[in-house]
Image (tube, rainbow, N blue to C red):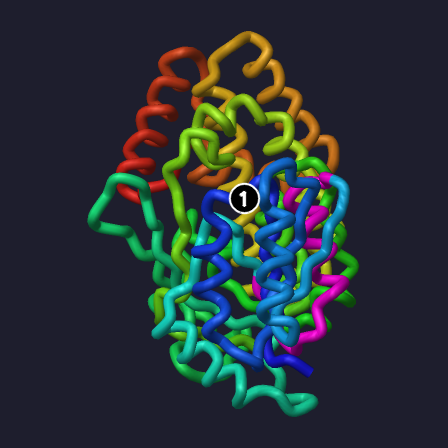
Amino acid sequence: MKLLSFTVPCYNSAAYMRRCIDSILIGGEEIEIIIVNDGSKDETARIAEEYAEAYPSIVKVIHQENGGHGSAVNTGIEAATGLYFKVVDSDDRVDAESYQKILEVLRKYQNPGEELDMMISDFEYDKEGESHHKVMQYKHIFPEDRVFSWEDVHHIWKGHYILMHSVIYKTALLKNCGMKLPKHTFYVDNIYVFEPMAQVERMYYLDVNFYRYYIGRADQSVQESVMISRIDQQIKVNKLMYDFYCSHYEELSREKRKCQVLFNYLEIITVISTILLAVSGTEESLKKRKELWDYLKEKDPECFKKLRYGIMCGYTNLPGKIGRKVSIGGYKISQKIFKFN
């Protein structure tokens, strides 16, 4: 069995996928790389096959009809044979020095009953045109360099949540948790982190900047204008996460810290949906904002109250034009501080 499986979802990725794959290959024979060619129309398929031919014991290629990022991740999980699993998007890369430290830790937790459910590391925003790159760290939340449980997690600040770039999951947990990411839907990486986390018990945090998250292409899915144009998909993901949280709340509430981490995640995704609809400002967008909150209220009135009247969502739902301007102003300040979009 391989120690660590990587899945690299690729759609028309020929221009940048080599940098990504080359950064992962240095893991050698302990790892496998599953390149999922998601119906690309450029040279992605040819490049992927070149790697499979050059590294037959490490690289495998799966070609499929276009199903979107979630479909490619689903395919990668199904095909993975490694003990642990990591998604690396084809325009991102991993840091070589941090990579070796990650593998060193994972080697220690291979025996049955001793495996980690989730490993967490930091990541760096590799933002186009900026020489100084912001690092997302979790050392104020999680104990360092040891196995820990949810009871050991420190205070969690509002708005702080774990992204896909930060996590390595146990492959068996992903295969068994029942998660199926929806096809042709952006922003499913949030579901990818959110749903399996409900099953996590044994964790390990390593304070290294393992993942380099490229951000800045004009067509990138996290660009504000692109997110507004795809707001229906953001809302879809928001609703799926809300449905999952509400349906699992009884069991989640038995572990206070876990429940808090998942709620914080749900809260920030709901804030993003709400504020983007306000930024758009069209009559249709404001109608969708109302429909979203009506849906949340009807689905689970108690969870709705907790979200709607909490600090973050309350701030983004200030009434009237002036309220929307204040909310958008706060959002713009957050963009500058946290370097997203």
Residue 302 at what x, y percent from top left? 66, 42
Q: How many marks?
A: 1
Residue 201 appears in the picture as rendered = no
Snapshot quadrant of residue 175: bottom right
Q: Residue at x 72, y 56 (%)?
A: 62
The reply to whether the magenta stretch includes residue 156 is no
Residue 14 at what x, y percent from top left? 53, 44
Q: Is residue 293 above or below residue 95?
A: above
> Please, what secondary structure does the residue beneath circle 1 have?
loop
Of 283 and 300, the residue lying toward us: 283
Pick out the residue farthest to the top. 283
Residue 330 at what x, y percent from top left? 32, 30
Which residues are the magenta region? 66-86
In this image, 58 relative to 154: left or right?
right
The reply to whether the magenta stretch includes residue 83 is yes
Q: Which residue is mark 1?
A: 13
Q: Residue at x 37, y 71 (%)?
A: 96
Of 264 and 68, the residue lying toward us: 68
Of 57 and 103, the residue lying toward us: 57
